[in-house]
Amino acid sequence: MFPRRFNYRQLAHLMKQFGINVRELEGVEEVIIRTKDKEYVFENPEVTIMEIQGKETYQIAGSPQIKEKKREGIPREDVLLVMEKTGKTEEEARKALEETKGDIAEAILKLTGE
């Protein structure tokens, strides 16, 4: 396969000649992959972007925490809206929505103290 003393500069040069551009995405704090019944949460992962003929492929390196998803009656979009309008955390927004039986306006008022 590769010789013991492989020259990574040569590889990068060859990849560039073939139109393959590889770069690291800086400052990534978290990557979440959601499936039907689980969430894979990567904290502080290394993310590499490989661009080939105008298409990007993302590679995530790290160890995920796997969380079973709870089936909740509160839509994620509602939680995100309450978070955006109040500046509160997801947990606080979800709790307020649960306490108000999903009433977005009431949840916002509850969290802002108005």
Image: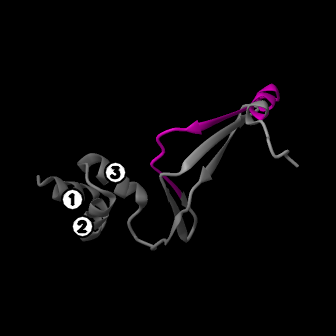
Question: Residue at 53% across / 51% down in the picture?
Answer: 45
Q: Is 3 rendered above or below residue 61?
A: above
Q: Residues within 10 Å of mark 3 (few under 14, many from 20)?
A: some
Q: Please tell me which of labels 3 and 2 falls first in the chain.
A: 3
Q: Residues within 10 Å of mark 2 (few under 14, many from 20)?
A: some
Residues at marks 3 and 2, CA–CA distance in whole angstroms: 15 Å
Question: Residue at 82% across / 29% down in the picture?
Answer: 18
The circle on residue 90 is: none
Q: Is 57 rendered above or below residue 43?
A: above
The reply to whether dot 2 and dot 1 touch (C-beta < 8 Å) is yes
**Which of 7/27 is in front?**
7
Question: Can you identify the residue that label 3 sits on?
Answer: 81
The reply to whether dot 1 and dot 3 touch (C-beta < 8 Å) is no
**Which of 98/103 is in front?**
98
Q: Residues within 10 Å of mark 1 (few under 14, many from 20)?
A: some
Q: Is 108 rendered above or below residue 12?
A: below
Question: Can you identify the residue that label 1 sits on?
Answer: 106
Question: Can you identify the residue that label 2 sits on?
Answer: 100
Q: Quadrant of residue 102?
A: bottom left
Looking at the rendered image, the disc whose residue lies closer to the viewer, 3 or 2, is: 3
The reply to whether dot 3 and dot 2 touch (C-beta < 8 Å) is no
Residue 69 pos. (x, y %): 48, 71
Q: Is residue 72 left or right of residue 11?
A: left
Q: Is residue 77 left or right of residue 68?
A: left
Q: Which residues are magenta?
A: 11-32
Residues at marks 2 and 1, CA–CA distance in whole angstroms: 6 Å
Q: Is residue 38 left or right of residue 111?
A: right
Q: Quadrant of residue 72?
A: bottom left
The kind of residue tagged 2 is: Thr
